[in-house]
Image: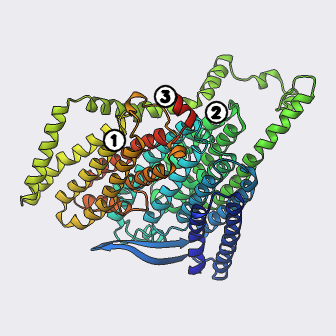
């Protein structure tokens, strides 16, 4: 079983690498995609058959330990149970159908190879989530799925709206990653070496002593619910999913109709022993589900496109799944997930054909044509058909058109305060910034001279404050890519220095973190220097430069730098983030909040720069520059 399990996880990664290194030839890419899905199907069905032969018992397998230092270790741990089996089967079935469909659907599309790379990367991340044995492994897959979504939403990069929507979706992803990232270090803090999913059930057995107090478990539960709500587009984050439909129809089907939308449900299922232990988190999940169903059902009625209608219909169904989870109906949730995934995938795949057919029908009839037939309602009395007052009907209609004003609400509460604070910090004079930098250097020098441990803790506080200030400065800076890159790297370096001051024995882990951040920063500055050699970015900060087409090699370098700086699981910075949080929180839990928020803000800031530089139409660029 262990070999089949590894095959299920690694085959999409192998497919991604084969496509990446293959020439831009449709026939070869299509053949690779087809055969990899067939081989993956054999592995999935073989694994499920072997699992059934063993009596459907939970199966845990540790492949190897990726990193170990003192009491910390990061094992590549996999886990299969009925929840993972259901998701794994649906992932394979939907992914195989999408690959077969888009081999023809995207024929002669300019981004044919790019699409298959992103979709195989998504499949790898999704399998990593489904078969993860710990929250650390789940977070790695979570990040891979997020980047794949980001790239596929902006697939039609010649149009500005898909690019803006990609940044909008990625912004929500990054914000909700706060819940999963902080939840990861809290699991280390509370459960120590017992944060495996296979051990959660026994830890929360009613006959055992709870592994943590009510307050700690409540905070951890709220963080998990935040991450699940953002990923599954639940209240108040429902607005990003219809906008994510800007990507190709196959990616909309596999991501936002069938699979990605249900990852929040999967997270709640995996961590159910934690958040369902008390009634308050259950009530929160129930409330989120009910509010989502209300808003999404109304918004779906006023959508002017099929994709938007399917998106809100899927959001509403996931909201019902949240209600079912709050009521403890786990088996029903799995059946509901499988039915909704297959239905939404089918609806999105056939939507282009339906639109074309209806347009032909409309062109052939001589009278008015309405897609929806409401004749069956005419037999009802008028008092029942129009039971709501006109004022209330109009209010609900405007509320539905505005999609519940959720985007405005999130913007007002989350982003505008951060942007305004960042603008004020950027407006500070250069001399004050220089003096603040010299003061920080003096603090670090004093701390390194051998002061007491208490003094080092107090000296780390202004450094952690400076880390947050630098991140906010990068978040609000839209006119200098170099300053954004420098600020993000400086913020990460300050985070490492602050942890070293608090926990001097963590210097080796800080160096590991720097080994991922510093090379990524240097690579990004090098790429920016080449790409912007003949351009003055501040003159046209909101023009899309389209370097992904005119300078594809250097754009790839910039993208790799972007991944390294956000702690994507291809560099040591991914492990370093977890290590920094673990060391700091073990001594001073308060430090987890600013360092996590800084990491999240940094990712949004450099994602905006990457989109501005690499997306767009080359013709528009020449007109804007020359």
Image quarter (top left, top right, bottom left or bottom right) of the N terminus: bottom right
Q: In this rendering, would 167 be left or right of 302?
A: left
Tell me if residue 107 can be seen. Answer: yes
Q: Residues within 10 Å of mark 3 (few under 14, many from 20)?
A: few
Seen at 16% across and 33% down, the residue is 432
Q: Residues within 10 Å of mark 2 (few under 14, many from 20)?
A: many
Asked which secondary structure carries label 2, the reply is: helix
Would you name the residue on which mark 3 appears?
626
- Closer to the eye: label 3 or 2: 3
Spatial separation of the CA atoms under disc 3 and disc 2? 44 Å
Asked which secondary structure carries label 3, the reply is: loop
Asked which secondary structure carries label 1, the reply is: helix
Q: Residues within 10 Å of mark 1 (few under 14, many from 20)?
A: some
Q: Position of residue 536 (x, y in %)?
A: 38, 33
Would you name the residue on which mark 1 appears?
482
Would you name the residue on which mark 2 appears?
299
């Amino acid at each position: 079983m262990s070999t089949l399990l590894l095959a299920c996880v690694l085959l999409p990664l192998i497919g991604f690498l084969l496509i990446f290194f293959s020439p831009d030839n449709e026939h070869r890419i299509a053949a690779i995609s087809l055969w990899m899905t067939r081989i993956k199907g054999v592995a999935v069905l073989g694994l499920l058959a072997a699992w059934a032969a063993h009596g459907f018992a939970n199966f845990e397998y540790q492949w190897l330990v990726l990193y170990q230092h003192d009491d910390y270790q990061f094992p590549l741990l996999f886990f299969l149970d009925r929840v993972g089996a259901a998701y794994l089967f649906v992932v394979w079935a939907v992914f195989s159908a999408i690959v077969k469909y888009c081999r023809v659907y995207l024929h002669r599309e300019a981004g044919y190879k790019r699409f298959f790379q992103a979709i195989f990367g998504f499949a790898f991340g999704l399998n990593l989530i489904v078969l993860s044995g710990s929250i650390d492994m789940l977070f790695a897959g979570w990040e891979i799925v997020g980047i794949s979504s980001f790239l596929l939403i902006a697939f039609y990069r010649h149009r500005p709206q898909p690019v803006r929507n990609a940044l909008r979706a990625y912004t929500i992803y990054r914000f909700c990653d706060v819940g999963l990232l902080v939840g990861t270090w809290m699991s280390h803090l509370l459960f120590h070496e017992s944060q495996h999913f296979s051990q959660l059930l026994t830890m929360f057995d009613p006959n055992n002593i709870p592994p943590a107090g009510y307050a700690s478990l409540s905070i951890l539960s709220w963080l998990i619910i935040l991450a699940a709500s953002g990923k599954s587009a639940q209240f108040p984050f429902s607005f990003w999913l219809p906008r994510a439909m800007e990507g190709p129809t196959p990616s909309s089907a596999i991501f936002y109709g069938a699979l990605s939308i249900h990852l929040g449900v999967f997270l709640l299922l995996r961590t159910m022993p934690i958040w369902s232990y008390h009634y308050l988190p259950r009530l929160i999940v129930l409330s989120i589900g009910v509010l989502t169903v209300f808003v999404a059902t109304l918004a779906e009625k006023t959508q002017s496109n099929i994709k938007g209608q399917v998106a809100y219909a899927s959001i509403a169904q996931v909201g019902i799944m949240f209600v079912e989870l709050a009521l403890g109906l786990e088996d029903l949730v799995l059946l509901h997930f499988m039915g909704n995934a297959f239905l939404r995938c089918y609806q999105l795949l056939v939507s282009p054909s339906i639109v074309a057919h209806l347009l032909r029908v409309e062109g052939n009839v001589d009278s008015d044509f309405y897609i929806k037939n409401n004749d069956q309602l005419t037999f009802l009395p008028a008092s029942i058909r129009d039971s709501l007052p006109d004022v209330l009907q109009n209010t609900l209609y405007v509320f539905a058109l505005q999609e519940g004003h959720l985007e405005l609400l999130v913007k007002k509460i989350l982003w505008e305060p951060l942007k305004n604070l960042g603008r004020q910090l950027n407006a500070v004079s250069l001399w004050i910034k220089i003096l603040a930098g010299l003061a920080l250097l003096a603090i670090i020098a004093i701390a390194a001279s051998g002061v007491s441990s208490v003094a080092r803790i107090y000296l780390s506080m202004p450094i952690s404050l400076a880390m947050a200030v630098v991140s906010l400065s990068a978040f609000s800076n839209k006119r200098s890519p170099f300053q954004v890159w420098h600020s993000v790297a400086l913020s990460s370096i300050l985070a490492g220095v602050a942890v070293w001051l608090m926990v001097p024995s963590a210097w080796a882990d800080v160096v590991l973190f720097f080994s991922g951040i510093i090379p990524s920063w240097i690579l990004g500055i090098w790429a920016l220097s080449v790409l912007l050699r003949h351009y003055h970015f501040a003159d046209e900060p909101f023009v899309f430069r389209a370097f992904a087409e005119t300078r594809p090699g250097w754009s790839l370098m910039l993208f790799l730098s972007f991944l390294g700086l956000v702690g994507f699981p291809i560099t040591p910075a991914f492990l370093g983030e977890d290590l920094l949080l673990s060391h700091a929180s073990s001594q001073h839990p308060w430090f987890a909040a600013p360092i996590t928020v800084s990491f999240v803000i940094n990712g949004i800031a450099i994602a905006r720069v990457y989109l501005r530089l690499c997306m767009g139409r080359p013709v528009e660029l020449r007109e804007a520059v020359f």
